[in-house]
Image (spheres, rainbow, N blue to C red):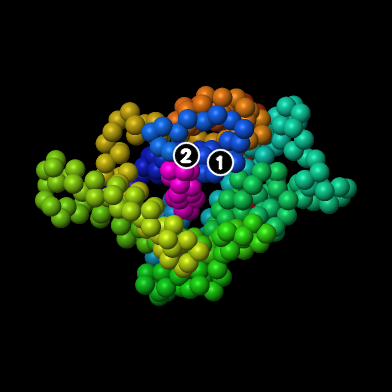
Amino acid sequence: MTFTKADTNRVKGTAIIMMILHHSFMMPDRYDGMVVLFAPFTESQLNWICWSFKICVALFTFLSAYGMTLSYKKADPAYALTADQTQRLVLGRTIRLEMNFIYIFLASTAFGLVMNHHLLGDKYGPGMKKLIWIFVDMLGLAQFFHTPTGLSTYWYISLALILIFTMPLFLALYRRFGGAVLMGISLLLVILFPVVQDDPSVAPTYAYFSRYAVCIGLGILAADRRLLERIRDWHPLGGGAFASFLKGAAELLLVVFLLYTRIRVWGTTLLSVWEALIPLVICAFHLEFLSRVPVLSRILEVLGIYSMDIFLIHNLIRARWFYAFTYSFRHWALIALVLLADSLAVSFLMEKIKKLIRYDRLTKALEKRACG
């Protein structure tokens, strides 16, 4: 059994739960003026845990690199694609990403205006500049060009687009020089183009791309060399239920250890290594253990299917539209659960509307026309 699309969605589901918790409780200013119960943790403990869940971005990046590698490998097992083949793959994925984001951007903007939230107000500036900034933001490029954005969460779209366009270069390096050189150059990108992490006055260079270069490289290796399947099939303690339990416990402890030590390498080159190792271990744990839990695996899979929509919508619900309602449930776990349910419900509705207006057909038509 390989790491399937269903497994990918399950990991995305886990990443979305992490993201909900991260954005809701990573700092006290996220729930300013609201009464929140933190049991069984203290406030500072929960803040730290949720802050560490920013690893969800690395999970999405790892899965994207993994999935794109398999797409290229399907087109040519040796990755020796022609310029035309590469162009089709890049254009097709770009159009699908852009069309999904544009739909959510326009739908959420329209709803925000109905809610009397002026998303298109002073933030973009006056006159013609306002229209240009809105257009750039609608394409998901605000973070790349350091222009105003209606919601800071949209920054990831810039990273996703950069990944799509640089993936052929990563694979060309891998095909020509092998995995060791690929990982070495990925690490070199981190060193040569460091990202300023903690200074809000300095805009991150190219949507944090260099920070996730090692994650991208490891995602390529994991897909091509079946690292996840090899970890699953590795049984150092032999077979049996107890040996399996020990292996699963060891992987969970490794994730916790890496998350804990991640703060100590923050702002250093090693952070990018941690951002690659943690997704690898989490994906391996999902494949071997969580995929066997029927109800939980199905819930995570559903969340993963709607992860793109939830990712782009949940902060609007939490911080813009229904802030008081979201935090009115007092206990942190209940707040997160309600926000997750609200975001899933809105995502489900938006996907139904998308089908009703045949937006998917428009996307496929554009992709077909662009890719010949």
Amino acid type, mark 1: Pro
Residue at 42% x, 61% y is: 264
- Horizontal relation, residue 33 to residue 106: left or right: left
At which x and y percent is residue 49?
43, 45
Measured Cα–Cα span from mark 1 to mark 2 = 8 Å
Look at mark 1 in the image and give the residue it sits on.
28
Q: Can residue 249 be seen in this view?
A: yes
For residue 127, the mark is: none
Is 55 a magenta residue?
yes
Q: In this view, does 245 lie above or below 255?
A: above
Q: What element carries label 2?
A: helix
Residue at 13% x, 52% y is: 237
Instruction: Name the main secondary structure of what is drawn in magenta.
Output: helix
The answer to the question of whether label 1 and label 2 lie on touching residues, with beta carbons closer than 8 A, is yes
- Horizontal relation, residue 358 to residue 340: left or right: right
Among the 4 quarters of the image, the one containing residue 315: top right
Q: Residue furthest right?
A: 127
For residue 43, the mark is: 2
Among the 4 quarters of the image, the one containing residue 76: bottom left
Amino acid type, mark 2: Glu
Q: What element carries label 1?
A: helix
Residue at 38% x, 57% y is: 261
Q: What stretch is highlighted in magenta?
A: 44-61
Residue at 33% x, 28% y is: 295
Disc 1 crowd, CA 10 A, few/some/many (<14, 14-19, 20+): some
At which x and y percent is residue 325?
60, 25
At which x and y percent is residue 340?
50, 31
Q: Is residue 273 above or below residue 324?
A: below
* Quadrant housing the N terminus: top left
